[in-house]
Image (cartoon, rainbow, N blue to C red):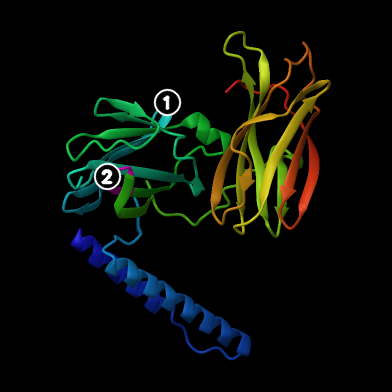
Amino acid sequence: MKTVRVFLALILAACLLAGCGGNQNSAGQEADNSSDAQTESEAAESSEETAEAGQPQPIELENFTSGTIYEEGEYYFHIDSMEMTDESYVITYRAATDEQNYSGYYDMRLTINGIMFHEDDFAFSGAGMEGYTMIGGGPDRPITVSIPKLLLSHVGIEEVTSVKFEVGLGYSAQGSVYEEVMIEATVYPGAKTEAADAFPEPKDDAWVLLDNEYGKVQITDANYWVSAADGHIMGITFHLLAKGEGSGNVGLRSIAAGSWESDDSMGDYGCSLPPYMRYFRITLMGGDDPAEGTDFSQSVLSYYCDAGGLEELSTTLDLSGLSNE
């Protein structure tokens, strides 16, 4: 682990040296250089503070599908494999922690191709356990986390090109959680590529709910929400991506097709505008079943946008022929 840290430190030093150019002639360019230098200085200070706190610094690894991400004392995080199956993208890992004579604590957040998902979007299994939260199996007990291909397809991901792990290792005692090690590692199954716009091509312009200086919110896909008992349509589930300046919110009010309206919501309350790409899922449900033969091709979605001022808006979507999942 110490070798990895030295290697990373050398890379950081090389990057900082590569970023130092000659003096520019214009005052504006000089100001930009000063700003860049200040940013680099602040980054270096932050890096030093992280190191002094005993925390591992963020790392990036190319052509990575297996290997040890972190190992220090009893704290351990290792990837056995990363591969796409017929149903899911499956990551097999091992995690361990110093329980401090209490109970071990683990947490994991995954960002796929630059998109942050919910912590409970993926299924974990192993060590005789299953669930939607991280399971720490130990150095000799591998755990798998399965990321459904269907979920990835809802946001336009066909191939996984990067996975960012944010892992907390520690212990819980007397109702409190103590994260002793926080790991941030971005790995690329192949060569690292330049960050691309994670917003897929919209099905129609009407599927973009917000796109201005405050941020962007786009419906990337939708599916019918049906009754498990008789298969009747009970609502519509919307899959959305959002990114912005860190403030603002977009929320869905109701969906109407002909005389049928669904205005009760389940899932996320709305889409915030964080400075990173975020996945949201909102189901509009409630009311009676739509009449047989209801035309969903001219469905009217009512929503609000609270970014620079509250607005009540609507858009017409073609929601005919959706899948049920």
- Residue 132: in magenta span: no
Secondary-structure class at tag 2: strand
- Name which of mark 1 and mark 2 comes first in the sequence: 1
Number of on-image labels: 2
Q: Position of residue 15 (x, y in %)?
A: 38, 72
Q: Nearer the viewer, residue 223 or 138?
A: 138
User: Image quadrant for the C terminus?
Assistant: top right
Secondary-structure class at tag 1: loop
Crowd around label 1: few <14 · some 14–19 · many ≥20 (10 Å): few
> On screen, 232 above or below 144?
above
Q: Which mark is residue 173?
A: 2
Q: Position of residue 59 (x, y in %)?
A: 34, 58
- In magenta, the rendered stretch is 168-175
Question: Mark 2: which amino acid?
Answer: Ala
Q: Position of residue 21 (x, y in %)?
A: 46, 83
Q: Main secondary structure of the magenta part?
A: strand
Q: Residue at x 48, y 87 (%)?
A: 22
Tell me if residue 64 can be seen: no
- Residue 170: in magenta span: yes
Q: Which residue is mark 1?
A: 86
> On screen, 70 above or below 141?
below
User: Image quadrant for the N terminus?
Assistant: bottom left
Tell me if residue 307 can be seen: yes
Residue lying furthest right: 259
Crowd around label 2: few <14 · some 14–19 · many ≥20 (10 Å): some
